Image: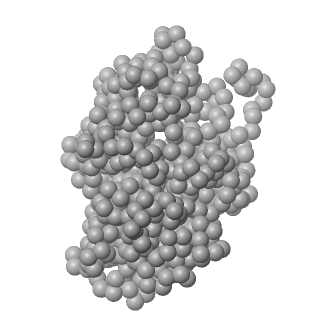
Amino acid sequence: MNQHKKKINHFLPVSISEIKNPDLNQLDIVLITGDAYIDHPSFGTAVIGRVLEDSGFSVGIISMPDWKNPESVNIFGRPRLFFGITGGAIDSMLAKYTALKRYRSDNPYAPAGKGSKPERAVIVYCNLIKQMYKDIPIVLGGIEASMRRIAHYDFWDDKVRRSIIEDSRADILVYGMGEKQIIEIAHRIDTGKDLKNIPGTVIMSKEIPDNSMMLPSEEDASKSRKIFIELYRKFYTNQLKILTQQCGNRYLVHYPPAEMNSMELDKIYDLPFTYLPHPLYREKIPAYEMIKDSITSHRGCFSGCSFCSLSLHQGKKIISRSAESVTRDVQKLAQNKTFKGHITDIGGPSANMYGFSCAKKWKCGRESCLFPSLCKNLQSGTGKWIDLLKKASSVKGIKKVSIGSGIRYDLFMIDKKSRKHLETLIRSHISGQLKIAPESTSKRVLRAMRKTPLFRLDEFIKLFKALTKKAGKEQYLIPYIMTCHPGEAGNDIIKIKQDVVSLFGFIPEQVQMFIPLPMTLSSVIYYSGEDPLTGEKFPSAKKTEERGKQHKNFLLKTSRKNRSANEL
């Protein structure tokens, strides 16, 4: 049977009663996640479960286990091969606490947005398993594991923590998206082979592997800011090598990233997802409601922004799905009885990075294709993305395709046909507003963020307004701004606010207080006061009161005399 016509008729089991094969006494693999189980390719647990199933392994899912009860991870009993653990779609500390370290009041990955996961969920779930089964292999994956895979600064503890593979006592850690790694791991455990030399993984070893680069020891990096900066610089600039770090009397071994291509990505999206939350949930799940009418077109991000996890997790190489693969998803969505005809997004980390390629096949030594300047080897894919939106719009049952996630506006404008493309976007693919992310207007803050605007923001705003008027539409730009990022000090935030109000005519709602996410460049700058790649020094607001004041100063309304007509 053609795989594109596979009948979508089942979820992966979440209980023994849902196991389809009555002769199956033991599952091969059990996946545990801190989120609700949504059988959709936008959610990592579903993807990993489906690729394992497609490779012939039997899989069960335990979602949101009761971390106070070891029996909650024993629903299926002991799996034949291993337990796979993820904290969920975001780091559990970020899920639990705000930028001011206060408890969050909601959880978009749980039914009705309620219900919490434990702090350091990956470690907690591993401990539950160890209480039940002392010798079962454990595989870590997901963003929490991926972005804590080496010694890293932790904002919540305000110190350097060791790799999560040590704290969890797991057998292997998968970083990145993980589909190829998990299949290789499953086959190796199934055949009794060791777990060495698997791209995109981290293991603990008693020996130093051949041809590896030694990083500063974990102990030294945790005691000295200077050595921690050296550790991070070596790690960040040598990720295509085998990296080794001494951790007590053992060694952490970090293998180079796994490779994937467009054909392999297409195959993943052709797997028989139901595209629905599991029916055991009777209340809506906010994260699903947000993406249910959207489609992912690509992976990766080559911007290299210092505050972002994307390039370290997904990689800087853009892997775009074929137009045919995306169109198949559009056709599936159009046939859904609850679909109203409006696709709310077709994109990825930055929607308009679809179709971009590199003349050097992404093998150069630059950390960013856009900083400190535009790389000459970057080949624009904006035209391909616009064509993709047009093709999706022509599918029967589709009334509108709009871009909900926003674009990197300056990247959009490097194409020779950028004005024509922007006209098309404004005329056909904006639903009232277009989100962009200037982040800041301060040169020092943008430098710390490693963001060099490739096109003037004021010129883009002017062009957007002119083309919107020409199209006879009433549409607006919505800027995303970040406060408290390293580089921002004193009264900088007042000047930034004045710039934003002058440019846009209002104080935007999309304002986020910077959080030093594990393993990001910005977290190192925040902790050490120094960019580990350039040696530049940047001030940072560290005290909670100071950070809160900076953020509040941006959000405070200006005096009535100086407020724009839009605000009034």
Pinpoint residue 119: horizontal percent, then vertical percent.
62, 68
Locate residue 332 relative to residue 1 in the image: left or right: right
Direction bottom: furthest residue: 249
At 52% from the left and 77% from the top, the residue drawn is 129
79 vs 402, nearest the viewer: 79
**Looking at the image, is 316 positioned above or below residue 27?**
above
429 left or right of 508 in image: left
| Viewer-side residue, 115 vs 435 | 115
Identify whether 27 is placed above or below 274: below
Q: Report the side of 100 relative to 443 (left or right).
A: right
Indicate the colouring scheme. Answer: one colour
Q: Is residue 484 visible?
A: no
Q: Quadrant of the C terminus?
A: top right
Q: Residue at x 51, y 45 (%)?
A: 276
Q: Position of residue 360 (x, y in %)?
A: 20, 47
Q: Nearer the viewer, residue 564 or 399?
A: 399
Residue 57 at x, y percent in the picture: 34, 64
Does residue 136 appear anywhere in the picture?
yes
Figure check: 76 above or below 179? below
Q: Residue at x 25, y 44 (%)?
A: 1
